[in-house]
Image (cartoon, helix red, strand yellow):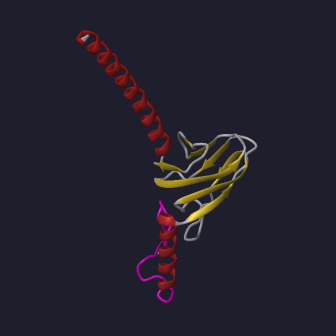
Amino acid sequence: MPSTYDPLLRLELQATGENATTWGIKTNNNLDLIAAAVAGSAVVSVSSGDTTLTTSNAAADQARCAILILEGTLTGHVNVIVPASPKNYVTLRNTSGAFNITVKNTGTGAALSSSGPDLVVCTSATCVNLVGALASSVSALQVQVNQVSAAVSTINAASIRVLE
């Protein structure tokens, strides 16, 4: 039975008894690819339209890397297309041009902030920007804090008038 490749990181899954004289080389290659998935970075050149990350079985590629460094002069909105499988990406945006960048797979995409860095979490169906979601939650919380603060000020002013 020949080797196969796992669907998430495209690592070589050696068949029993296969590669008797090269299994160490293949195992070390898999360990290098796992390291890239955990802490590796890839530079991705973008300008406009769709940019699909490279994918390769048992070889270095962009989509496996944990950190995506997006570079280029944007001349239009960009979709960075990632594989339709669960994966987390830290994105660093080193681009010029006032256009949007979205990381997406087959579903809804994650809009990146204009300054970054961002943390994008993808399932097999969608990608979400956790930093953007957190910023939105913090903004909503700030509105509530401002409302409570205004209410407390009103109560304090009313209390002072009663005491006078």
> At 48% from the left edge and 53% from the top edge, which residue is drawn?
85
Residue 121: x, y in percent? 47, 49
Residue at horizontal 42%, vertical 35%?
Answer: 137
Say which quarter of the image contains residue 151: top left
Please name whichever residue, 53 or 35, is drawn nearer the observer in this view of the structure. 35
Q: Does residue 3 appear anywhere in the picture? A: yes
> Of helix, strand and loop, which mostly describes the magenta segment?
loop
Residue 126 visible in rendering: no
- Span colored in magenta: 3-22
Q: Is residue 22 above or below residue 57?
A: below
Q: Residue at x 47, y 84 (%)?
A: 23
Is 14 inside the magenta-drawn segment? yes
Q: Position of residue 37 (x, y in %)?
A: 50, 64
Residue 95 in magenta stretch: no
What is the x, y in percent for residue 4?
49, 69
Residue 71 placement, left or right of 55: right
Image height check: is 105 above or below 8?
Answer: above
Counting from the top left corner in percent of width and height, residue 126 is at: 49, 43
At a point 54% along the width and 62% down the height, the residue shown is 64
Side of 49 where 87 appears, left or right: left
Q: Residue furthest bottom?
A: 21
